[in-house]
Amino acid sequence: MEANETQELQEHAEHGAHESALRPVAFTMSLLAVLVAITTVLGHRTHTEAVLKQNQVTDQWNFYQAKKNRGYTAGTAQKLLEDLQVVNKEKAAKDAENFARYAEKQNEDLKEGQEKAETLEKQVELAEHRAKFYDFGEALLEIGLVITSVTLLTRRRIYWFFGIAFAAIGIGAVLIGLDFEGIAHLLPKFFL
């Protein structure tokens, strides 16, 4: 074997050693890429959920307002009929009584409609908070992925550790988003 071939084999062996040392880094990058994709989907779905719930809130408040208007109109009609009982007092009194019952029913339904709308508003708020954590987690996972990839360029493992640290915080944010209802009372107002 010539000296040149020996040197080539030695360089190849060193290169192979570097490659095997970087395998965990490459695996970490692959794993982070998958986590970023999953988190992105969770974030998009949660944002969509918030928008759909907000539409339901709007519909519910419109329903509430319509009932309120119908109740007011029926009450006004009742008072008008009571005040104008000129021609057919019996029919006017009966109509006034019917309008009074209708107005009362509309007013009773208002409470239920208001409760439904407020419940939906809370669901919108919850979805928006969850989405914030998914977005934050996604950003940190992406940062971790980029910092980890610097390891391949520099061959310095410190970047791998920094990337893992960012990714760990990102995963924590995603986990908080997944169980936001159970954990929300523990978080400071800053996060909400």
Image (cartoon, rainbow, N blue to C red):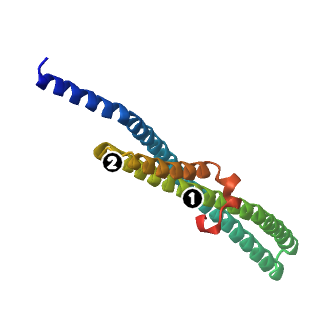
Describe residue 137's horizontal placement relative to residue 56 as left or right. Answer: left
Instruction: Determine whether 93 is above or below 124 in the image.
Output: below
The local secondary structure at tag 2 comes to helix
Q: Amino acid at mark 1?
A: Glu
- The quadrant in which the C terminus is found is bottom right
In this view, the residue in front, 72 or 20, is: 20
Q: State the residue position of label 2.
A: 150
Instruction: Determine whether 104 is above or below 141 in the image.
Output: below
Q: Amino acid at mark 2?
A: Val
Image location of residue 8, percent across then percent down: 17, 27
Residue appearing at x 51%, y 51% in the figure: 170
Residue placed farthest to the top in the image?
1
Image location of residue 140, percent across then percent down: 46, 53
In this view, the residue in front, 113 or 119, is: 119
Residue appearing at x 71%, y 60% in the figure: 185
Q: State the residue position of label 1.
A: 128
In this view, the residue in front, 137 or 157, is: 157
Q: Quadrant of residue 66?
A: bottom right
Q: Is residue 48 visible?
A: no
